[in-house]
Amino acid sequence: MGKNLILHKEFGVNPTIPICSFCGEDKNEVVLLGNAYKEEAPMHMQIDNEPCDACKKKLEGNEWKFFIGDCGHQGFVKVKALQELFTEEGLKDLGDHKTFRMEKCFQCMGMV
Ligand SMILES: [Zn+2]
Ligand SMILES: [Zn+2]
């Protein structure tokens, strides 16, 4: 995280495994929080909005988009699937955005 690690008085380096904010999976790394986290760090924790390597790859490609539903669901969806679900107008609105918000996700709309 670019900062000098200050050891936690009780928990030392206070390590945690960061979670990908996109897929919720563990990232392939360990982050030492030290005193930056006031309590004992949980085993897994979301510490930033950076995607994991797998999600980064999906976001860089043209095959996937990521939706965030106000219903609380989120996930990747294939552009191909969007082309079937959305009208041309709707797709135009999405444009080049890699992530987009929906009021209700596909699941909650009963589309999948
Ligand atoms: Zn991920
Ligand atoms: Zn939903």
Image (cartoon, helix red, strand yellow):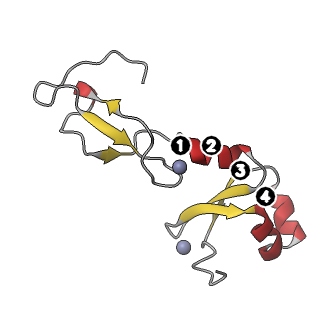
- Nearer the camera: disc 2 or disc 4: 2
Q: Relative to residue 88, is residue 14 drawn left or right?
A: left
C-alpha distance separating marks 2 and 1: 6 Å
Task: Name the residue at 82% across, 54% down.
Answer: 95
Residue at image coords 40%, 39%: 47
- In the image, farthest residue toward the bottom: 110
- What residue does disc 3 label? 98
Kindly identify which residue carries mark 2.
56
Picture quarter with the C terminus:
bottom right
User: Could you classify mark 2 by the number of other residues whose Cα lies within 10 Å: few (under 14), some (14-19), or many (20 or more)?
Assistant: few
Going by the picture, which residue comes out furthest to the top? Answer: 4
Of residues 48 and 79, which is closer to you in this image? 79
Q: Which residue is mark 4?
A: 94
Q: Is mark 1 within 8 Å of ligand 1?
A: yes
Label 1, label 4: how many angstroms apart (C-alpha)? 23 Å
Total number of numbered discs in the rendering: 4
Determine the residue positioned at 49% across, 66% down.
Answer: 72
**Mark 3: amino acid:** Lys
